[in-house]
Amino acid sequence: MSPLPGMGRTLAEILPQPTNRRGDLLTAIQAGKRAADPTSLTDRQRKVLANLARAGEDGLTDFQHPGIQQTSAGKRRHELACSGLVANSGRTRVNEYGNPATVWTITAEGIDALRGSGEVAA
């Protein structure tokens, strides 16, 4: 999506993202709200966030999380990015297959969320 004229931000960045669909059951609505809450982390999200905190400014690609498959790390990282807890560093690294992979870093909000979850942020 291209930026709105003169605003520098896309419509998706301005409008709040829905956490459920019309007609969802109450349990799905509650789960969506929990998932959208940056202070509510799953164990796997917390592990990805802790790995990124330990990596510091060097960051990590989705392929570099110890003990987590790339596909799982990527999904958790995407959820964390949607919550503003991690950010694209603007850099890439070559992965084990010889392809460029995006390097992600933890944000200040991510460090706060990690501290709030009982983990010690680096």
Image: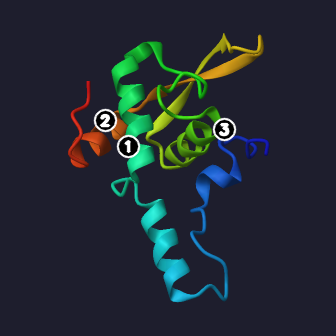
Q: Are marks 2 and 1 in contact (CB under 8 Å)?
A: no
The nearer-to-camera label among 3 and 1 is 1
Sequence order check, earlier mark of 3 and 2: 3
Q: Can you tell which mark lies on residue 111?
A: 2
Considering the image in quadrants, where does the N terminus appear? top right
Query: For this view, does 10 lie left or right of residue 52?
Result: right
Q: Hey, which residue is sitting farthest front in the picture?
A: 67
Q: Can you tell which mark lies on residue 31?
A: none
Above or below, comparing residue 79 to residue 37 in the picture: above
Sequence order check, earlier mark of 3 and 1: 3
Instruction: Give neighbour class at mark 2: few <14, some 14-19, many 20+ (Cα, 10 Å).
Output: many
Residue 107 drawn at (x, y percent): 40, 32
Q: CA distance from mark 3 to mark 1?
A: 32 Å
Sequence order check, earlier mark of 2 and 1: 1
Provide the secondary structure element on which disc 3 rests.
Answer: loop
The nearer-to-camera label among 3 and 2 is 2
Residue 10 drawn at (x, y percent): 69, 47
The nearer-to-camera label among 2 and 1 is 1
Color encoding of the figure = rainbow
Residue 24 lies in quadrant = bottom right
Q: Residue at x 33, y 54 (%)?
A: 39
**Number of labelled discs?**
3
Q: Residue at x 37, y 38 (%)?
A: 110
Q: Amino acid at mark 1?
A: Arg
Provide the secondary structure element on which disc 2 rests.
Answer: helix
Q: CA distance from mark 3 to mark 2?
A: 27 Å
Residue bearing mark 3 = 8
Residue 34 drawn at (x, y percent): 43, 67
Query: For this view, does 102 lie left or right of residue 35?
Result: right
Q: Can you tell which mark lies on residue 46?
A: 1
Q: Amino acid at mark 2?
A: Ile
